[in-house]
Every structure is written in structure tokens, then in C-alpha cells.
Image: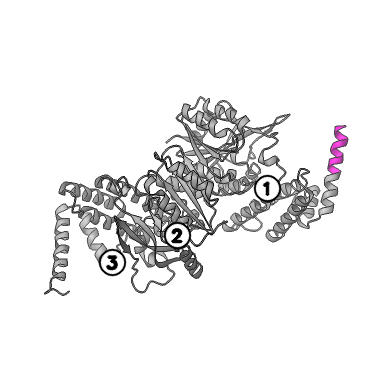
Amino acid sequence: MPALSVIVPVHGVEPYLRQCLDSVLTQSFTDLELIAVDDASPDNCGQILDGYATRDPRVRVIHLDRNVGQGPARGAGFATATGDYVWFIDSDDWLAEGAVAAILDRIRATAADMLLLDSAFVAGGESTVHPMQPPPGVPEVFRFLDWPGAFHNPAPWTRVVTRELVVRAGLPFHPGWHQDVPFTFALLVAAQRIALLRRVCYFYRTGRPGSITAKPAEARCRMLIEQSRRVYEHLDSRRLPPDDPLRGVATQWLVLRGFVGSAQPDLPAPVRRAIFAQFAAAYRRHGRATPAIGLGDAVRRRVLGSGSWWTYRAYAAAGATRRLIRRSPTGRG
Amino acid sequence: MPLLSIVIPIHGVEPYLRQCLDSVLGQAFTDFEVVAVDDASPDNCGNILQEYAARDPRVRVVRRSSAGDAGPARGAGFAVATGDHVWFVDGDDWLADGALEAIAGRLRETSADMLCFDAVYRAATDTVERFRPPAAVPEPFRFADWPGAFNSAKAWCRVVSRDLVVRAGSPFHAGAFEDLPFTFALLLAARRIAVLPRVCYFYRADRPTSTMNTGSDRKLAVVTQFSRVFDQLDRAGVPADDPLREVVLHRMITLGWSVPGDRSLPLPARRALLRGLSEEFRRRCSVHLRGSIRDRLRRRMVVHDMWWAHRVWCAGAAARDLVRRS
């Protein structure tokens, strides 16, 4: 059994695929397997994968004859994985040099069942590092409720987890866009030892045409809300009481997403208004009875719960004014 | 979403594959999908599957580049299956006429999360394996109500809900005898087990190269698989004197008895097997196994790793068979 299984669903990424695979297979740490799932890719990806598999025995390929989407494709790869740890990566991204060795060192030092990684977002030639910033007081090895911010980027590639953790979380491989929301939430709920590795391990390609992030905003919001329903279903299935703080964390996230979704400056106002209404409805359906996480969350819940677009606009305007004052030389700074 | 996903792991079954697929696709009941997993089959199975998939939109094909085992192949198929219920069928077996209609009807009647039925073992003569709980067990029941349900441990001898497989932790393990921990996990997690008293499945019991008949080291996996079953019992907090443990022990004795006696295996492998089983036994069991004198004698030989006694017993049984046959 290898120490790590790197699982990568592949669909329509021919120009980027080799960079991704090479970045895995040239790692200094070699006790890994790469499981590539060809999700009925319409381009040449299938052949590229077969070529890699014949050259390197660590590569295993699964071909699907119709497109099932990232979640179920990851599930098919996971079923084939034999490593103690798994890392779900995307096929148009790539790993940093030495990342796997650093990850396994850190895992050995912390006995973590989930290790969170720093990553860099790459657009064109520019890369921006997004470091994790837990507040002071969070212990070195912690649980989800110690730092709910561990969920703020739910992309699966932001963490390496034990294979056993994925099983304990109930193999939450769901269909649809944004399926990483219920996936990562379920892993975080089940994780007992979460640790951080403060090192850029992963390069995320943004702004690629055809990537999910390039889809229409309103449809994405609808999908996001649909997936957050799965988060609450998961909490129900674990028989958590209505006032459990984990439900509060789920709601805090949903409300924040509602505010982010309604504030996108490049969207026309009617679209933003429709998005706000969708999130308000979702909040009233799932989140209203759950406990608030701090004052800011309580205020935002009130605003979203009112369902009133003008209340939201007033709140947003107040926030903008406050930021303006802070930034101005006469402000409090 | 179809009512049923039929997941078929496929490796080296070319002569039998068409019969299997035809028996599924020719059913009168049609609300199902087939997820065929080509597990790096070295023969022509891949092309046969392509042909069926081109002809029938209900057939989906998953191809794996490296041959694994039936367990992980089933797992890969399960991951992309969309039906409410799943049936894991083997590529060299076939379904009885009308089986799907009967199963669908019974599922509707009982809202079972596990439906068990009868199967025919097809060899020179047929043997029917019937799944019949005692009359005192009301339907639907749970595993604890009738631990004997574990005696039909094959992956194919039940239709289960998707949700049950997930709740059981998707127990798709590698290695031969993978159906032991698989079935055990499903039984432990099942809430509504129901019975369909009808032959739904034909198992090809006389195939020379089926995994169960190959005299390879694969059989050593039986120890690992029982170890997994015991782990499940411990995790579920099943007490030491629970009847569930008894049924596992009994099964382990039966297999632990017959597998080291399998004359297709080389002697050193058989010796190692008995030792492995014996160690596993002593590590796990403090339970006193009830049963006939024969059962208790067998148990003693396995637990205490009595290799020569085991050989003498096997030789005696072989001689008796010879005399009977003459």
C-alpha cells in the first residue's frame, strides 16, 4: 500500500493535463499512486492517461463512458485507491515541488487525519498566495469547531485526508457543481485531528474558459444552495440537535455566501437581487433555528432573514462607508 | 434515476459474458441501468461491453487500467451508479427470467433496504441455496434477529439500497473472499431485511478458472477478511457472547476447515493457512463454540493448529468418499 493516493478526475483539460500529471510523478517522495479518472473526456485526455499508465506503474486509469461530474468521478477513483492518505486534486492545476514530502512529514509529526495546505491562485502569469489564517488560540491540532474557517475554501485540493476519514464521513461524493461543499463539510465534521501545513503545496489555475468558475452566476448560486441543503441533510443524518454549533457553522457559511453572491460588482442589479432572494429563502428554510456564531453573523442573519433587498443595500452601503472612513487619512486607520 | 443499478465487475469471463448481459437486458422489467466494470480484462470482454453499450443506452462501461479485484471494481462501479437500489452481479453468472420484476415488486411491498432471494449453484448437478429465516422471525427483520443470514455471504445474493451501502461504509475490500467483510458490514447496517422466496440468480459453480477455484495464494486472504469482520464486530460494540459472533466463528471454522484441506493448493500454502487462521482465532475468540461433537473437534484442530490431525482427518474423509463412490 502506498502512503498517498493522488486522485484526479479528468475532463476536457488536454492543454493542462501533462503539467498536472508530471507535477505529481516527479515529486521527490515516490511512495504514491496516481489514480486518474477519465470522466468521458471529449478530447485526447484518455490517450494521454493511457500513455502515462504504460510508462509509470504508479499510474492507474479509470475510463468512464459517460460524463458523471467531479463528485462521482472522484468516488470511482477513491474506490480504487489503496493509500493511507488521499489527496483529491484538479486536472488543470499542479503540485508544488517537494509538496508531497513536506505533507507526509507534517502528517507524521501531527498524526493528523486532515492536513490543510496553503495554495496559490494562478491567473495568467500572476500567482497570489492564499495562506490560511486561523485566529490566535487555535491549537496545533484542532477540530472543526475550534476554527470554522477551515471550511472557507471548500475545494477538495485544499486538504490531504486519511482514506479512513472519507469512509467515516460516509463517502460524500455528490453529483453537480459545487459538490465540494457537502463533501468537505462532511469530512470536517468527521475529522478528529486537523492540522496545518504553512507551505504553498498547490497551484490553482483560475479563469480558465469552460471551468466551473466560468459558469453563469445565478445558476451557480442555485447549485450552491442545492448543495448546502445536502450539508444540512448530512447533519440531520448524524442526528445532531437543532441547536448544535455545527449547524450554526453551516448557516454562518451559507449567509456569508449569500452576501458575497449579492455583492458581485460585475453583475447587473436585478441578477444580484434574484440571488439575494434565493439565499434569503434558503436561510429561512434551513438556517433560521440554528445558533449564530458571533455578533457579525447575528447581524447578517437578521439582514438576510428580512428578505428585504433594500435592508441589504443599506447594510452594504454602511459597510462600504465604514471601510472608506477607515482607509481615509483622517479615519481611525 | 432508475430503480436498480446492476453493477458487474468483469475480468476474464469472455465465454460467459454474453449470457450474463443478455439475461439482464432481456428482462421484462426495464427500469434499471447496468454498470459494467471492465477490470483490465485480458480477453475480449472490453469489446463485447462496447458492443452492448452501443446497442443499449442502459449499459454503462467503466474501464480500469490495472486489474484489481472484484471488491474495488464493484466500488468503482458503485461510485457512478445512480439507482435507488444496487445488485452486484458476477460476469460469469446470470439472472433468472422475471427476476427483476419479482424483486421490484417485493421491494415496493416491503420497503426493504436489503432483499435476499434464492440462487441455483449450477454444476454437474444443481444445488439450490435457499434463503429462509425461521418462521419465528417476522419480516422485515434485522441481522440480530437472525444471525444465520450471514451463511449466504456472496455479494450477489441480495439487492440492497444505495443508502445502505453508504451507511455500511462502502465496504469494498481488495483480495479474495472480499464478500465476507462486505456482506457482514451490510447486514450489520441493514434496518429492514426482507425475503423473496424465488430463484433469482444462477451461479456458475463449475468454472475451472473462477477465482474461487484457483489454487493460488489468494486463498490466504481468508484470514485478512475474517480479521476485518472481527474489526467490524468490535467497532459496533457487539458483546463477546453475542450470537452474531457465534455465527462468524462457525463460518470461520467451516471455511478454516475446508480451505486448508483444499488439495489444489500446494502443501506449504495449506500449512500457512491453517497457522494463520489459528493465530487469528486465538487472538479474537474467547467464545465457546457450541455445536455437534464433529464441530467441536474441528474447532479444536483449527484453534490449536493441529496440522497432522487435520491432514489425517482430511485423508479419512477422502478415503470415505472414494469408498462411497466405488
Question: Image quadrant for the C terminus of chain A?
Answer: bottom left
Magenta residue check for B54: no
Q: Quadrant of residue A137?
A: bottom left
The outermost residue toward the left is A330
* Between A207 and B62, the one nearer to me in the picture: A207
Q: Which residue is mark 2?
A: A160
Q: Earlier in the sequence, mark 2 or mark 3?
A: 2
Q: Are marks 2 and 3 on the same chain?
A: yes
Neighbourhood count class around disc 1 (C-alpha, 10 Å): few under 14, some 14–19, many 20 upward: some
Q: What x and y, as percent, mark residue A35?
A: 49, 50
Q: What x and y, as percent, mark residue B80?
A: 46, 42
Q: Which element type, helix, strand or loop, lies under badge 1? A: helix
Q: Which element type, helix, strand or loop, lies under badge 3? A: helix
Q: Which element type, helix, strand or loop, lies under badge 2? A: strand
Pointer 2 with pointer 3, Cβ within 8 A:
no
Q: Which residue is mark 3?
A: A294
Rendering colour mode: one colour
What's the magenta region?
A: B316-326
Disc marking residue B195: none
Q: Which residue is mark 1?
A: B218
Vertical placement of A111 versus A37: above or below?
Answer: below
Residue kind at label 3, given as amino acid type: Gly
Neighbourhood count class around disc 3 (C-alpha, 10 Å): few under 14, some 14–19, many 20 upward: few
* Between B279 and B55, the one nearer to me in the picture: B55
Please state which of the two labelled residues, at mark 3 or mark 1, is closer to the viewer.
Answer: 1
Question: Image quadrant for the N terminus of chain A?
Answer: bottom right
In space, the residues marked 3 and 1 are separated at their CA atoms by: 57 Å
Tell me if residue A173 can be seen: no
Q: Chain of mark 2?
A: A
Instruction: Tell me which secondary structure the magenta stretch mostly adopts.
Output: helix
Residue kind at label 1, given as amino acid type: Arg
Residue kind at label 2, given as amino acid type: Val
